[in-house]
Image (cartoon, helix red, strand yellow):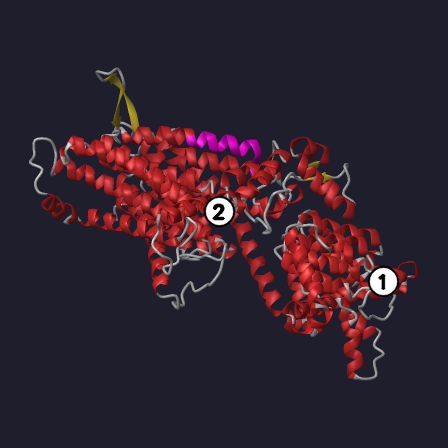
Amino acid sequence: MNRAIVGQTLLWCAAVTIGLTPGVLATDFGGILPWSQYVGSLALVFACLLTLLGIGVSVGTTPTATPSRFAYIVGGVLAVAAGYGWLQTCAVPASWVGLFSPASYLAYVQWAGSLIGITADSSIPISISPADSLDSVAWLAIVAVASTFATVLYRDRHRAAGLLWMILAGGTSIALIGIFRKWIPDFTLWSFQAGGEGAPFGTFLNRNNAALGINLGLAAAIGLSAWRWEIFRSTVVGPGRPMGAPSRLAKRWFSDPMSAIATAAVLTGLAGVAICGSRGGLLSAVVAGTVVGLTFAKRSRLRDVIAPNVVARAKAAAVAGSIVLAAVILLRPGSGDPSQPPPTAGTIESAFQAGTQRLSADYRLAHWPDGLRTAAKHFPAGSGYSTYRFAYLPWQQTSPWRWCVHADNLWLEWLVEGGVVAALLLAFLLWQSVQMIRRLSRSPDPFDYGLSLSVLYALTVIGVSQCFDFGLAMPANFLGAALLFTGGFTRAAQVVVSTSTSRGGKLKLRHADEQAWKSTTFWRQGMVPSAIGVCLLAASLIALTRLRLNSRIDFAVKSTELRFDAIKSAPEQLNGQIEELQTLAKEQSRPELLDLLARCEFQRGRLQELIAHQNATNTASLARQYAESSRNLRRLAWRRSVPELAGEAERSPVEVVAKGFDDGAHQATSPYARSLARSKESLFARPMGLSPRMNLVFTEFVHQTPSVTDEALQQSAQLFRNNAELQFRLGTQAADHGGYVLATEMWRRAATIDATMVRRVLARAARYDVFPIQKVIPGSAAPKATVDRYLVDGHSNQRSDPNARAAKSDTEHSVNPTRWNSSH
């Protein structure tokens, strides 16, 4: 068989595999699951291997262009970003961290250090969650390698066009699935009912993330339409040819299958962006559409088809309409109520005022000052990739009630996580992208011009939408954007400057002739690319190994959580599950895995303690002894056995028999001691985590340091100060052992940020002996009004009050609390 045919077949298979991967990832909730990233990475590495084989087979058989360094911009930037992210996870002297990221130093030495003994002499990383950062580094490395190999694949115009078609298919699929599910809500596939902000769309859990995926598909559709238009204009409506009737032009346009499909994809994408409900996605589409439309009108000589005065008026109308539409998108209060009367001048004015108030009260605007404050505290080195949800917690002042897992401003989030290096890389990539678009737009190849509009639309959409979202962090969107820009840089690298100049003195541009760029030596054409490719594949295998282990751990953790209630009373099954988790922990100590191990070890300690000291005479007595060994009651029983602590502990309404501890509880091999040790490991791996702090509270009878318990409760309340439910439960934990000062602060905070918590707080506080109830009453108006209603109703009406029943339920919950985790 001809080696050239085999080589081209391998390259085409690789191009299709890489091009389809973003769309396939998008079908699995945007690729957010660890196993999805692992499977996607497998496909990318396989495609890279096919590319390497294709290069080796076709050496000396076909002209091989040697692209300039300009083609490797995306891969190079991603590789530098991955390398810097890895450096952030390396342990260095704490004094160095204090110099380059002061807030990271405080996270380890001040916050976690006061609980587990991290000092200024310790070695710590810059990242405040190295495991999460290394996961991001592994994914960045995979995409960087794929981007580098893609420069070989998408150098060819046909394969580059195929990439646009595949990106178009992915974005259009998201839009079609989302629209279909709007029409048929009972459709079972992708039938999640909530996610992100409770507004999923298409195959994404968050409609804003879905909007970016649709917009990337729309960018590809626009590029393909512009490409076909350039060919159509030059062959059908070029200079000297009669324009013909509009219907005749439309018939000729839609007679071309590519033009018809691209046009249909544009309309579908616009419908998807409009229907999904993402204001950021719709606003970015309006801005990008205006920019691309004006650029297209300038280049494409619409005057050949439309009268010049009509074109000028259309441009002015497009700009004005875009401004008005952008204002409407930003200020709209949401989907309207069809039962409302038609708008009048007064209602329009009131709606505008309401929209302005809604925009000013947007939780994102309220949170961004905290994000900027966090970036300043971690400047210049950042907090580590994928750590934003923990990095901002100590510095929050204006954030809303919710836990901001993302900043809803990707540029701010990356500034916090990557520091000055991330800012410089983004600025460099933006500058080079502008140069790439300029090169492509001046190429004589119509496809390059269409690709320039595609990249221009994508660049504008990403720049605008990510000011209000984090959709580019989704693996499917990130990979799709990386491939689109890689294709643009690869094609632009072949547009070279001519030695002659035009009449205006500007340098002429021409498309490179492949024969002129042909490598004449076997060394340059075969050996060097193969050697570099092997090195890149080796690096990708290291990253792939981590992603594989991460997917295994994620599966083990989730499956154990689902089975925990079934195995917690079966010692043999519990021991077997612990051994499996311990094996994984030896390979990678992830905080989630360590927290689960701490929980399982505590449960094993309960069973062993119950068996070793069983003195029950009947089933009821045995059940009571088992209940009193729960995570909350076991520490209270220990406190009541210590004379110095018994007085405060006995003020709690929780009935528990005083119970000391065995010497075996202090042995390193005992389950309780191992539970405590796992919590300390988890806290070192993620110094802002909630779960290890709560387990320090539950294992108080092991470490026997009440000050550590109070510090863990107080830190948890400070870090998650905007979660009313968590403040209420933390206050209950403090009040149970007589920590009324802490309980007062936490309950008052809960009632302040959520007026509906007032009744529950008062009902709970009334259960404790000599508790200063008046101190938990907030000073703001809404909670005070609730207090007045509570006092008027009287304590006797609590039985019929749903809030009172909720308070009773919470009391029972405090006796047997559910598992605490970092995502609460």
What distance separates the C-alpha of mark 1 from that of mark 2?
47 Å
Quadrant location of residue 204? bottom left
Quadrant location of residue 751? bottom right
Return the x and y of residue 71 as percentages of the image width and height: 38, 33
Q: Which residue is mark 2?
A: 358
User: Residue at 46% across / 63% down in the picture?
Assistant: 192
Return the x and y of residue 337 as percentages of the image width and height: 39, 58
Q: Residue furthest bottom?
A: 618
User: Residue at 83% across / 51% down in the picture?
Assistant: 707
SS at circle 1: helix
Return the x and y of residue 775 as percentages of the image width and height: 77, 54
Q: Is residue 99 visible?
A: yes
Q: Earlier in the sequence, mark 1 or mark 2?
A: 2
Residue 787, relative to residue 81: is it above or below? Answer: below
Q: Which is nearer the eye, 502 or 641? A: 641
Residue 551, relative to residue 134: is it above or below? Answer: below
Range of the magenta residues?
A: 418-430
Q: Which residue is mark 1?
A: 649
Do residues under tags 1 and 2 come within 8 Å of each other at their CB atoms? no
Return the x and y of residue 752 as percentages of the image width and height: 67, 52
Quadrant location of residue 373? top right
